[in-house]
């Protein structure tokens, strides 16, 4: 359980970070 609690937020942060970088590169005006 502890491992899941530690890994899940890390994955979410990585996904949000990658998505943010992609949005910055493509342009915010572009719809998802």
Image (spheres, rainbow, N blue to C red):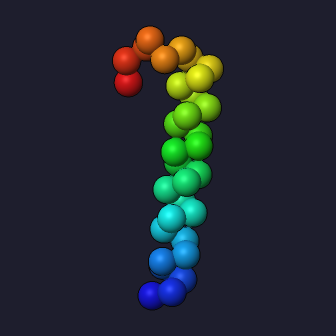
Q: Hey, which quadrant is residue 3 in on the image?
A: bottom right
Q: Position of residue 20 (x, y in %)?
A: 55, 34
User: Which image quadrant: the C terminus?
Assistant: top left
Q: In this view, which residue lies farthest toward the bottom?
A: 1
Q: Hey, which quadrant is residue 27 in on the image?
A: top right
Q: Residue at x 49, y 56 (%)?
A: 12
Q: Position of residue 18 (x, y in %)?
A: 59, 40
Q: Hey, which quadrant is residue 1 in on the image?
A: bottom left
Q: In this view, which residue lies farthest toward the top?
A: 29
How many numbered marks are there? 0
Q: Residue at x 51, y 87 (%)?
A: 2
Q: Residue 5, relative to residue 15: is it above or below?
A: below
Q: Residue 24, relative to residue 4: is it above or below?
A: above
Q: In this view, which residue lies farthest toward the left?
A: 31
Image-based side of 14 in relation to 5, left or right: right
Q: Residue at x 43, y 13 (%)?
A: 30
């Amino acid at each position: 359980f502890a491992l899941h609690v530690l890994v899940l937020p890390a994955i979410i942060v990585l996904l949000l970070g990658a998505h943010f970088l992609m949005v910055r590169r493509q342009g915010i005006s572009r719809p998802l």
